[in-house]
Amino acid sequence: MVDKIAASLATAPPEVRFAAGDGHHLVIGPGKRVVAEWSAAGLSLPDLPAMRRYRVDRVAAQLVTQGYDGIIVMDPMNIRYVTDGTNMQLWVMHNGARYAFVSADGYVILWDYYGCEFLAAHSEVVDEVRPAIGSTYFLGGPRHAEQAARWSAELIAVIGVHCGANPRIAIDQCHHVGYRMLEEAGLEIGFGQEVMELARAVKGPDEILAMRCAVHACETTLAEMRAAMVPGMTERDLWSMLHAGNIRRAGEWIETQIIASGPRTNPWMQEASSRVIESGDIVAYDTDLVGAYGMMVDLSRTWIAGEGRGAGGAPTPDQQHTFDLAREQIEHNIELLTPGRSFRELTHQAWYPSPDEYRHYSCLFHGVGQCDEYPEVYFPEIWDEWGFDGELQAGMVLTVEAFVGPRHLTEAGDWLEGVKLENQVLVTDDGPELLTAFPLDLQPSG
């Protein structure tokens, strides 16, 4: 059945396919008001065609290096990387209704959701757009295997045209029915996530310009949050401001809902709640924000709400001491982000408070680009279980993480409050460059 469908698709008439420039060209981008904010801050806009070409070239180079003839990507973040096209990004994360193919010589085909072929009209790196064939049970119901056969047959036909005999193909993620059909057709399948993570790890100059714009948009919104934060708000009240400011400034979504106040700050990772923020509470958050141009801004800050409970309205000694430890951790560890340093060295040269006395975060560093990306750098205590080596290169962007949660109880029997801090850093030949400069102060000024 698959072979029969593949043969018919290989000779299908041109009208079933679409050139990337066909149809209505949507007006997308940050808009004049947001661009004016960036211009006033002295920022330059990215050259988007150059950024798109850089990304496709990075993928093609990885394919050649790893001995693949092409790659099929179904992860929406990878589709965005190779096409710079978006469509219902969160929805398609759980519905396989978009995918793309890149050959080792850089030919790009995007399969988009039915009737949405025009959405990639802005992207000159996309050579063809075709209607996608979804094979999830939601989309295919009891006919899902039939749809998977159509999906795999079309991919086999494409691979036959662009990859030659006995092709070796990478796939980042795939519904198992379609994957099995590709293997049954004799294709050698490899691990596409490795290809994509390594391609995405080193950012081009225009990606960095795009990230700077996204950072400015995020930090402008954080300033609004900070100015508006007053006791009596709920955590969700405050968190909604980050969502609103991100969308208003050409952002896309927020990956998590991690904001906590008072006793909810330790242990870490609690999501936004209806708890009312009280005067003197610590309020801590992690942005995990996919912002302008699809670039992630991943920073964490911790503030005192209202009047501090210490002498003269200052933070309490416990709050200040915990904050100082977290600040020392990220400031020390930022300095380690230099080209040529190994991940093993990052793990074993990093400083952090004693884990016997303080809870810490799940990692010391991680890559960041369109989202959390390779590499993840773990603590020494779990190196043997989780650690892997590699080397920092100029152009990589990493976040430096710190959570410090005292393993001590208050008189009321609660854990002392914790502090979360995080900065985003560009690795350069001249040393680490801090991309997120929003103030680290525990107590808002004014």
Image (spheres, rainbow, N blue to C red):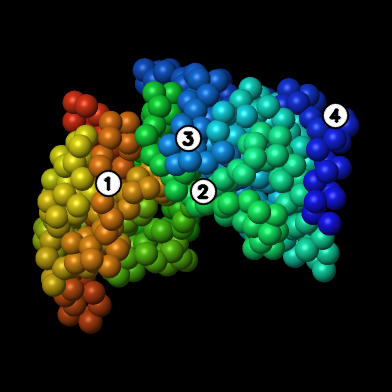
User: Would you say residue 438 is visible in this rendering?
Assistant: no
Residue identifier under label 3 = 64
Nearest to viewer (mark 2 / mark 3):
3
Q: Residue at x 26, y 51 (%)?
A: 389
Q: Earlier in the sequence, mark 2 or mark 3?
A: 3
Structural distance between the alpha carbons of marks 2 and 4: 29 Å
Q: Residue at x 32, y 65 (%)?
A: 268
Q: Earlier in the sequence, mark 1 or mark 4?
A: 4
Disc number for residue 218 = none
Position of 107 with respect to 112 (left or right) is left
Q: Earlier in the sequence, mark 4 or mark 3?
A: 4
Q: Residue at x 15, y 40 (%)?
A: 335
Q: Are marks 1 and 4 in contact (CB under 8 Å)?
A: no
Residue identifier under label 4 = 14
Structural distance between the alpha carbons of marks 1 and 4: 46 Å
Secondary structure of the residue carrying tag 1 is: loop
Disc number for residue 192 = 2
**Which of these two is toward me, 8 or 312?**
8
Q: Earlier in the sequence, mark 1 or mark 2?
A: 2
Residue 398 picture location, percent across and down: 31, 42
- Inspect the image, locate mark 4, and give the three-letter code of the amino acid beneath it: Pro
- Inspect the image, locate mark 3, and give the three-letter code of the amino acid beneath it: Val
Secondary structure of the residue carrying tag 4 is: helix
- Inspect the image, locate mark 1, and give the three-letter code of the amino acid beneath it: Gly
Nearest to viewer (mark 4 / mark 3):
3
Position of 46 with respect to 348 (left or right) is right
Q: Earlier in the sequence, mark 2 or mark 4?
A: 4
Secondary structure of the residue carrying tag 3 is: helix
Residue identifier under label 1 = 390
Position of 416 with respect to 210 (left or right) is left
